[in-house]
Image: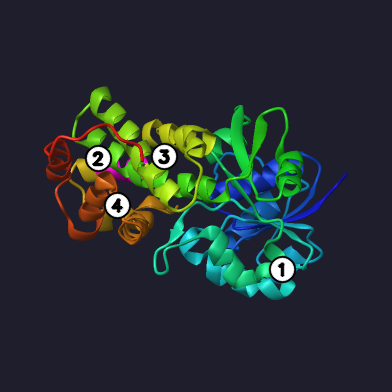
Amino acid sequence: MTTRIAVVGAGSWGTTLAAVLAKNGHDVVLWAFEADVVQQISVGHENQRFLPGIRLPDTLRVTGDLAEALFRAEVVVNVVPSQFAGRVMADAAPHVGERCQLVNASKGIETATLRCMDEVLMDALGEERMKDFTVLSGPSFALEVAREAPTALVAASVESSAAARVQWLFQNRYFRVYTNPDVVGVELGGALKNVIALAAGMSSGLGFGHNTLAALITRGLAEMTRLGQAMGAQPTTFAGLAGMGDLVLTCTGELSRNRTVGVRLGRGESLASILREMSAVAEGVKTAQAAHGLAEREGVEMPITSEVRMVLLYGRDPREALWSLMERGPKPEEWS
């Protein structure tokens, strides 16, 4: 059965998800903010700006008009970067049907308000449209999915039927989707792993090897789990695809934007110069500040996140940040 789906946001991940859905036989319209992206996909079936070299399905349509993209959509997939999603979805609200299912595939925390994406989108779209709200997250580089590399993700919703529907919409021979009821845990896992990836990149940029990386990943997971539990998430979620899976991918993969930013910081480049050269968004840069705010609000210790924030906001030397973590007082290995 064909489903009418609007994908809002034509970065590398939004374009890839739209292609997955189109290949699965659904009626898909992709909304792009950038006029050149609309032109490139319409004429050449390629998003040269964000996903170069990937031929997109001929059946995938693209538009720069939100109303056109959302017309009669049964499912709306938000893939707008987290700091802009509220604004875009508020503009989209008049065109989103009350029975439309909302799927969020954007990973981040709104810096100004410390809200996760479910809260941001509820404010933009209203409670009625959030009944079947589902989060799609997990270890997935857009380029690898676009090349049909076997990939596994999680669809999380408090409504099991909603998660199952998203599972059915997306799943195919190379894109496997598991369901999970823990919306908060899956959202936090997808956002917080980017902060730890920045630290992992800094470690690599400083010339340290696998010992340091393993320590950062493991203790980073402990931080993520502590904050998640304080906010009502299930600790087991962080041992799964949306937690450990995404964390390992983002901390070790060469395609990781956040790891790349960290590597360059570790080598002595300034954050401003790095970001000027990037066309895509490294969500961890903004999420570090938001995660620190959540940790303070919840009374949770997150030392790696705190040091990453100091590097990003106040220019702390990454080497000093790493040694500060190592020289903290002796502690037991705690996860709660």
Q: What residue does disc 1 label?
A: 128
> Residue shown at 82%/64% (left/top)?
72
Q: What residue does disc 3 label?
A: 256
Q: Nearer the viewer, mark 1 or mark 4?
A: 1
Label 1 secondary element: helix
Q: Residue furthest top?
A: 210
Disc 1, disc 3: CB below 8 Å? no
Instruction: Give the overall secondary structure of the magenta segment.
Output: helix
Q: What residue does disc 2 label?
A: 202
- Residue 244 or 63: which is nearer the viewer? 244
- Residue 276 or 43: which is nearer the viewer? 276
Residue type indicated by callout 2: Met
Q: How far is disc 4 from disc 2 in space, using C-alphas? A: 13 Å
> Which label was assigned to residue 274?
4
First in sequence, mark 4 or 3: give its number: 3
Does residue 210 show up magenta in the picture? no
Q: How far is disc 4 from disc 3 in space, using C-alphas? A: 14 Å
Q: Nearer the viewer, mark 4 or mark 3?
A: 3
Q: Nearer the viewer, mark 1 or mark 2?
A: 1
